[in-house]
Amino acid sequence: MNHKDFTHQVTSKLDGLAKNHRNKAVVMSNVLEHIHKKPINRFSSWKMTGFALAATITGFVILPNIMQLNEKPHPQQVIVSPKLSPQMMEDLEMLSVFGEDTATHGS
């Protein structure tokens, strides 16, 4: 029998006994009093405080960046390129060669 089956068997047995118990209210109040008397674990409160602090810092870092992204309108960019004739393309290539120091081109 594995742990899950054992836990289910014990839980079902206790549930059956609890449903048929005649002093259910008294038992429940005793259990609640016993739970409230337990000392508070300070380590768990520090863990929750650290988690809340980390979430707050993350919110302060991320939230303004998100707001700034939504406020900036992105202008539409249009590229217009007129068709160049083959002669104009050759002329542009020659002009680009004039600006170079070394001539390693073919013709």
Image: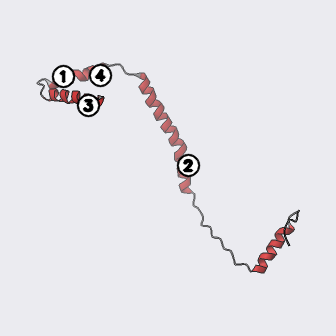
Residue that mark 3 sits on: 5
Label 4, label 1: how far apart the Cα atoms are: 14 Å
**Could you tell me if the residues under marks 4 and 2 are in contact, i.e. CB atoms within 8 Å?**
no
Q: Residues within 10 Å of mark 4 (few under 14, many from 20)?
A: few
Residue in the picture at 57% in, 60% down: 73
Which color scheme does this rendered protein use? secondary structure
Residue that mark 4 sits on: 36
Element assignment for label 2: helix
The residue closer to the viewer here, 22 or 30, is 22
Q: Earlier in the sequence, mark 1 or mark 3?
A: 3
Label 2, label 3: how far apart the Cα atoms are: 51 Å
Q: Nearer the viewer, mark 4 or mark 3?
A: 3
Badge 2 amino acid: Asn
**Could you tell me if the residues under marks 1 and 3 are in contact, i.e. CB atoms within 8 Å?**
no
Element assignment for label 1: helix
Badge 3 amino acid: Asp
Residue in the picture at 16% in, 27% down: 18
Residue in the picture at 55% in, 48% down: 65
On the image, the x and y values in percent for residue 46 come to 45, 26
On the image, the x and y values in percent for residue 4 come to 29, 31
